[in-house]
Image (tube, helix red, strand yellow):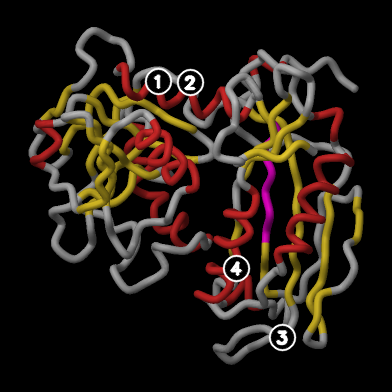
């Protein structure tokens, strides 16, 4: 294998040895297939190309302090993908097939799991697409489920360091009764213009408000939002937010630390009262936020004025990473040794 500089890896695609695939045809899922090809052949009328029948997941496996490979909360990803499939009428991937595929993909590409201590991990990308041909607007009768993997560094190049974000009031990420609560590609396509503009203007990401009233914080681009004040972990409650498994885990850790946890609406103005704020998700884990700028009004909300991530965010980050890398006892039963 080429000499990989593990600690310098970006968050991006990395070619590995194998991927795994299964096809849904004639009402049932087929056996898991192993492929070394990075190419898939699909029909020109496949519903994923025309009507957006596509869902994906993001997960990670970690090389622990003891050399063992740990998978983090895979059952929650399986459930979320099943929920996404129901949301846009695709065939659901059974939990047993999901697990078999994940474990097979990791084991086949074990040499690409980054060493402990490099800050890198093995990213796992399950994908479900409609491959059956339809010209009328209706669900496909055939689907492809596949998983590819690759070593990655942190999602935001800053890693666990302070980032700046921009509020994008003139773009909506998702409609209140739409697909914002499931993990489908259209949500991300709809966020690209705001994200690219934020990047060009010097910000790590864009923060979206609710589409209905434009008053409440929804998401930080591809991540969930949270704030800390008065020993309370607060995260938005909305029907158009994707339920983040990382956020769910951080809420449990906050309670474990004796904090209160609130899921409720958060106005833009309330930002001024928070001691710490951050973005969280599988790819980023936690990205502590230093500055949020309202692009429309120019108003600036500042945090962590000493230039360091806040103490609560730091503690939560270290606890979660400690569980993932086997440094901290997993009292929640979140990890599974591969």
Q: Which mark is residue 318?
A: 2
* Residue ID at (57%, 54%): 76
Q: Which mark is residue 315?
A: 1
The Cα–Cα distance between marks 3 and 4, rounded to whole angstroms, is: 17 Å
Question: Which of these two is toward me, 177 or 136?
Answer: 177
The Cα–Cα distance between marks 1 and 2, rounded to whole angstroms, is: 5 Å
The region drawn magenta spans 122-127
Q: Nearer the viewer, mark 3 or mark 1?
A: 1
Q: Is residue 8 above or below residue 255?
A: above
Nearer the N terminus, badge 3 or badge 4?
4
The Cα–Cα distance between marks 3 and 1, rounded to whole angstroms, is: 48 Å
Relative horizontal placement of residue 307, taking residue 148 as reference (left or right): left
Q: Which mark is residue 82?
A: 4
* Residue ID at (36%, 32%): 200
The Cα–Cα distance between marks 2 and 4, rounded to whole angstroms, is: 30 Å
Q: Nearer the viewer, mark 3 or mark 4?
A: 4
Query: Callout 4: 10 Å neighbours few (<14), some, many (20+)?
Result: many
Q: Nearer the viewer, mark 2 or mark 4?
A: 2
Under circle 3, the secondary element is loop
Q: Which residue is mark 3?
A: 141
Relative horizontal placement of residue 37, taking residue 72 as reference (left or right): right
Q: Nearer the viewer, mark 2 or mark 3?
A: 2
Question: Picture quarter containing residue 292?
Answer: top left
Quarter of the figure with the N terminus: top right
Q: Is residue 168 magenta?
A: no
User: What secondary structure predominates along the stretch shown in magenta?
Assistant: strand
Q: Is residue 6 above or below residue 127?
A: above
Nearer the N terminus, badge 4 or badge 1?
4
Q: Nearer the viewer, mark 4 or mark 1?
A: 1
Under circle 1, the secondary element is helix
Nearer the N terminus, badge 2 or badge 4?
4
Question: Picture quarter containing residue 252?
Answer: top left
């Amino acid at each position: 294998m080429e000499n990989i500089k593990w600690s310098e890896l970006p968050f991006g695609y990395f070619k590995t040895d194998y991927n795994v695939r299964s096809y849904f045809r004639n009402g049932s899922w087929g056996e898991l297939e192993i492929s070394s090809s990075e190419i898939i052949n699909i029909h020109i009328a496949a519903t994923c190309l025309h009507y957006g029948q596509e869902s994906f997941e993001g997960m990670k496996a970690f090389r622990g302090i003891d050399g063992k490979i740990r998978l983090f909360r895979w059952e929650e990803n399986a459930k979320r993908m099943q929920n996404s499939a129901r949301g846009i009428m695709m065939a659901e991937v059974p939990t047993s097939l999901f697990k078999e595929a994940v474990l097979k993909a990791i084991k086949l590409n074990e040499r690409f799991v980054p060493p402990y201590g490099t800050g890198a991990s093995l990213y796992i990308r399950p994908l479900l697409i409609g491959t059956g041909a339809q010209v009328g607007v209706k669900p496909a009768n055939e689907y492809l489920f596949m998983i590819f993997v690759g070593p990655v560094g942190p999602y935001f190049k800053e890693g666990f360091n302070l980032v700046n974000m921009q509020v994008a009031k003139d773009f909506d990420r998702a409609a209140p009764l739409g697909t914002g609560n499931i993990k489908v590609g259209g949500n991300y396509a709809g966020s690209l213009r705001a994200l690219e503009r934020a990047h060009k203007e010097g910000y790590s990401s864009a923060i979206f408000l609710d589409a209905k009233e434009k008053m409440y914080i929804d998401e930080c681009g591809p991540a969930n939002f949270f704030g800390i004040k008065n020993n309370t972990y607060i995260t938005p409650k909305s029907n158009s937010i994707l339920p983040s498994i990382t956020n769910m885990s951080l809420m449990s850790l906050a309670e474990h630390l004796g904090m209160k946890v609130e899921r409720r609406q958060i106005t833009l103005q309330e930002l001024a009262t928070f001691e710490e704020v951050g973005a969280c998700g599988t790819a980023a884990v936690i990205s502590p936020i230093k500055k949020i700028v309202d692009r429309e009004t120019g108003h600036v909300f500042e945090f962590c004025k000493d230039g360091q991530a806040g103490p609560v965010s730091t503690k939560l980050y270290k606890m979660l990473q400690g569980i993932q890398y086997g440094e901290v006892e997993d009292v929640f039963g979140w990890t599974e040794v591969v």
